[in-house]
Amino acid sequence: MEGMLVEEKNGDLVIDLKLCIYKLPEKARELMKNTASSEVILGIRPENIVITKESRENSLEATVVYIELTGKESNVHLEAGGSSLIAIRNSTQDIKAGDKVWLSFDEEKIHIFDQKSGKALLR
């Protein structure tokens, strides 16, 4: 996996995801102040990606490619900035293929790993 640089912008710690500039939540900012690592891997599980129909702070724009029904949950296949992503949702009644949506991450569920050592910095 390719590492991403943690940078300071306007007093916030951010990561350039190439799809958007992601502002780290407070918990992660405090952790990063106490570590020498600046190149990290950001991890998020598909079930911890939040899909909304309207833009939110710290979200990225995506398009719903198709929805795969898998029982009580659905795999939502998305495209954002030329990259393919999958999010898992319990209900997809409000979205359909072709819809423009915004993705954000459950800030309590993000993972940050040191690029060089692979050590978990936040999980």
Image: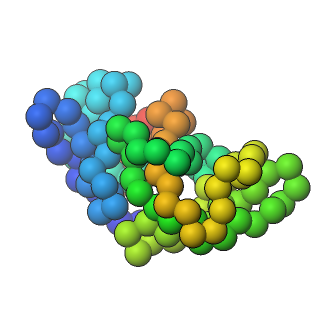
**What colour scheme governs how the chains and residues are painted in the rendered image of this protein?**
rainbow
**Which residue occupies 44% across, 72% down?**
83
The residue lying toward the viewer, choosing from 54 and 39, is 54
- Give the quarter of the figure containing the N terminus: bottom left
53 over 70 or under it: above or below = above
Question: Residue farthest to the right?
Answer: 71
* Residue 6: image location, x then y, percent: 23, 46
* Residue 34: image location, x then y, percent: 25, 27
* Residue 43: image location, x then y, percent: 48, 50
The residue lying toward the viewer, choosing from 14 and 2, is 14
52 left or right, relative to 97: left
97 over 6 or under it: above or below = below
41 left or right, relative to 97: left
Q: Is residue 33 visible?
A: yes
**Which residue occupies 11% across, 34% down?**
10
31 left or right, relative to 46: left
**Which residue occupies 36% across, 31% down?**
25
- Exactly how many numbered labels are in the figure? 0
26 over 120 or under it: above or below = above
* Residue 104: image location, x then y, percent: 47, 44
Q: Is residue 112 visible?
A: no
**Which residue occupies 52% across, 48% down?**
53
Question: Residue farthest to the left?
Answer: 10
The residue lying toward the viewer, choosing from 18 and 64, is 64
85 left or right, relative to 8: right
Where residue 20 sits, quadrant-wise, is bottom left
